[in-house]
Amino acid sequence: MSTKILASGIMTDKVIVANVNNTFSQVLEFFTKHRIQHLPVAEGDTLIGIISDTDMLSFIARQLKTDALDYAKLNMTFQIKNVMTPDPISVTPEETIENILKILGEGKFQSVPVVKDGIIKGIITNKDLVRAYNWEKTHG
């Protein structure tokens, strides 16, 4: 694959970002309304974490071990900082696709935020990499 492809060329730049103060219901709505699986978390404009739909399901499962499903209680006990992955690996818009493939190819992560000067500029998921690879294969 060509090193000419950069993060800025394959990232989703209209990224949905959660605020550290979002409630359980708000975060669930982000996932369902926007059909996303990964959600960067910011404090102000600064990236502080990332939360996935799997993280949310794990949180619900932990709560179900002690109580019946109660959305009001889930909203009260939910703190995004306790559910997200803090300080996620991120890349700059100038990062090459090869380096992004190395990060996501390890299988530990399914997405990587794109950050410039601490500000979230976009997100790249495994699906974005597959699309870029397919485009390169057919057009490169």
Image (cartoon, rainbow, N blue to C red):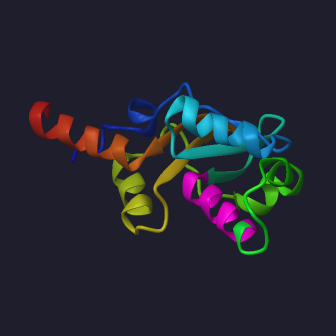
Check if residue 61 falls in the magenta segment. Answer: yes
Horizontal side, residue 4 vs residue 112: left or right: left
The outermost residue toward the bottom is: 65
Q: Quadrant of residue 89?
A: bottom right
Q: Nearer the viewer, residue 121 or 126?
A: 126
User: In the image, residue 10 lies at what x, y percent?
Assistant: 39, 34
Q: Nearer the viewer, residue 79 or 73?
A: 73
The outermost residue toward the front is: 68
User: In the image, residue 44 lies at what x, y percent?
Assistant: 84, 35
Horizontal side, residue 135 vs residue 44: left or right: left
Q: Total label count? A: 0
The outermost residue toward the right is: 76
**Residue for point 65% across, 44% down:** 40
**Residue for point 78% across, 54% down:** 70
Residue 135 visible in rendering: yes
Give the residues in magenta.
Answer: 52-63
Vertically, is 111 above or below 58?
Answer: above
Check if residue 131 falls in the magenta segment. Answer: no
The outermost residue toward the left is: 138
**Residue for point 43% across, 46% down:** 125
**Residue for point 18% across, 40% down:** 134
User: In the image, residue 15 lies at what x, y percent?
Assistant: 58, 31
